[in-house]
Image (spheres, grey):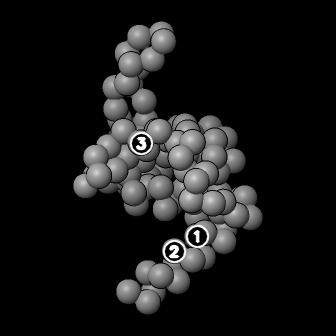
Amino acid sequence: MTSTALVLARMVGTQEAPEWIAADVCAVLGIEQHHRALAGMPEDCKGRQIMTTPGGPQELLTVTEPGLYRLVARSRKPEAKQRAARLRKARAQA
């Protein structure tokens, strides 16, 4: 997974508190049923945002930065596994 892969996931938070649309992140990572992927996550890893869509305003599930890392670690895509390993290594060195 390249860093440009997450460009396909809409960001709806701020620079200080980024959030991404959970369905987009899960699609990039090959995780089906995004609502199930978020079900067991702590509250600080997920959220909800109202977005304007062609069908009108919709409440969409989001993931925070810690939630994004959890989803990357959960993905079965080889690229995501490599990314998760690099994240763990970087955290251990910090």
- The answer to whether marks 3 and 1 mark residues whose Cβ atoms lie closer than 8 Å is no
Give the Cα separation between the discs numbered 2 and 1: 5 Å
Name which residue type carries label 1.
Ala
Q: Is 38 positioned to the left or the right of 72 in the image?
A: left
The correct choice, above or below, for 72 with respect to 12 in the image is: below
Place of residue 36 in the rendered image (x, y in percent of width and height, measured from the top left): 56, 41
Specify the label residue 94 is tagged with: none
Number of residues whose C-alpha sits closer than 10 Å to that of mark 2, classed few (under 14), some (14–19) or many (20 or more): some
Q: Of marks 2 and 3, which one's residue comes earlier in the chain? A: 3
In this figure, what is the number of numbered marks? Answer: 3
SS at badge 1 = helix
Observer-nearest of 51 and 47: 51
Give the Cα separation between the discs numbered 2 and 3: 20 Å
Which residue sits furthest right? 78
- Quarter-wise, where is residue 79 in the image? bottom right
Residue at x 29% of width, y 52% of height: 15
Residue named by callout 1:
84
Residue named by callout 2:
87
- The answer to whether marks 2 and 1 mark residues whose Cβ atoms lie closer than 8 Å is yes
Q: Of marks 3 and 1, which one's residue comes earlier in the chain? A: 3
Name which residue type carries label 3.
Met
